Amino acid sequence: MNRVCFVVALVACAAFAVTNTTMPSYYAVGSTPRELGRSIGEQQKEAFQELIKADTSLITILRPWMEANKTDYDNFVKANKAAYPDIFEEICGIADGAGLNESDAILLMLRPEIEAIVEPHPPNDNCFDIICNAEGKHAFVAHNEDWTPAYKPFGFVLHEDMAFTDTKVNAQHITAFTYPASPVGFTFGYNSEGLVTSCNGLNPIPCKVGVGKLGRYFINRDVLAARTIDDAIARLQKAAPNSALGFAMSIGRVGSRRLYHAEMAPYNPHDPKGVDSDGYVDIIKINSGETYLHSNSYTHPYFKGLINQYTSKSTTARLARAAEMLAPKTRELALEILGDENNTQYPIYRHGDPNDPEELATISTALMDLDDALVYVYGGNPKDWAPVVVMPLYNPDNGEAKTWFIAFLICAIAAGALLIAVIFLACFLCCCCCCQCCNGGQRGSVNSAYRRVGP
């Protein structure tokens, strides 16, 4: 029944989304990971060819690095393929469908790490998150999706139906914002188990690629397929020791007031080995009544001031401006922050201003309401624009509530059965007494009755 409701909701939001020219939706289905990827690539083939003309990083940065660092590239690819074989196959399928070389599709998946090595100031200074666990309503995750301005016309919502997956291990349906010939997971999204995630780029130094190291896009995609919050946390913790770079991730679930924020780094600053130590993820809980704002620097107490990182003026300015504004304890206040342009050089809502060293633009804004089970997606400044897409979040039965309900149902059935037994016994004893009375004075009783109704 839950899956039927999800499909109906998906079709309903499709009918709405296709009328919107600024935020189209696409649907991909596959009986294998490669088939799923091929479906994505085929739908986005023309868009990708146009995008690659505007964003030349594949030609100017990614391919040259691969050719100059073949051993590191091969080891990096091997590690991600071994850790995430289904995701890797999906990427290869995207390449098939979009008419790309497989190596190009894989390079795009490893883009954050390669650019962090090549660029002196890596362009991972993108996105802004607000996590709110306000008392009463509403708990939500809100997100500015920032990226290269060339991507502004190409962003879309992708719905994936992974018919091949084991639903005891992964969610079967994933919906997320993404770009042509790209997988889901590294922006904002949700799945058929009610899990929601959003990601921010971070710039730890150094970036580690090579033997056993994992790329953040692969990790992000894996976490978005988690079935529960605990499962998502476990996936992050499993990947952390081999993290090549790092990122921040917000995690929540529809129908649950459990909200978390994670920061992952390629080394543990508390380890005596320093930068030579394994990667580490720090996860904090956003308690009831709390809100948390995050951009593109390590701000958890575990990392803050201890990890070597590149922090841009834009990141510092955006966080400072957000701190000046009213605490975002409502959806409206959160959108006020995400749409703020008070600092004309380093606004929170960005337009790709050349004065901003990263020259990034806000491609879209999302607010995922965990109480109303709705996601609002904005194609323009959310202070001025109405959402261009409103989609239902999947709302599965809360596990704890379901367990409580089953226990209650069992007790109710047992109590009902006991009550029926007592009533039956009482009726039986009453009948017996009546029969004895009737047998002892049957003539008088019958005559008396007839006297009441007779002439």
Image: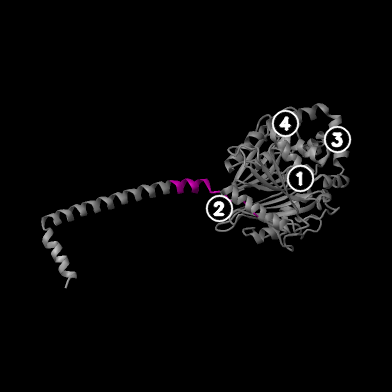
Give the labeled residue for mark 2. 288
- Mark 2 or 4, which is nearer the eye? 4
Give the labeled residue for mark 4. 81
Give the labeled residue for mark 3. 63
Element on which disc 4 rests? helix
Q: Mark 4 to mark 3: distance in Å?
A: 19 Å
Side of 376 relative to 343 (left or right): left
Residue 438 in sight: yes
* Rendering quarter of residue 62: top right
Q: Which residues are magenta?
A: 391-406
- What is the three-letter code of the residue carrying label 1? Thr
- What is the three-letter code of the residue carrying label 3? Arg
- Mark 4 or 3, which is nearer the eye? 4
- What is the three-letter code of the residue carrying label 4? Lys
Which of marks 3 and 4 precedes in the sequence?
Answer: 3
Element on which disc 2 rests? loop
Compared to residue 365, the image places residue 110 above or below, namely above
Q: Mark 4 to mark 1: distance in Å?
A: 31 Å
Residue 174 % position (x, y): 66, 45
Residue 149 % position (x, y): 83, 51
Query: Given contact means CB atoms under 8 Å apart, are the residues at marks 2 and 4 in contact?
Result: no
Residue 46 % position (x, y): 84, 46
Inspect the magenta stretch and tell me whether residue 38 lies in it: no
Label of residue 311 in the image: 1
Compared to residue 21, the image places residue 176 above or below, namely above
Q: Closer to the camera, 20 or 423?
A: 423
Q: Mark 3 to mark 1: distance in Å?
A: 27 Å
* Rendering quarter of residue 32: top right
Residue 326 in sight: no
Which of marks 1 and 2 precedes in the sequence?
Answer: 2
- Mark 4 or 1, which is nearer the eye? 4
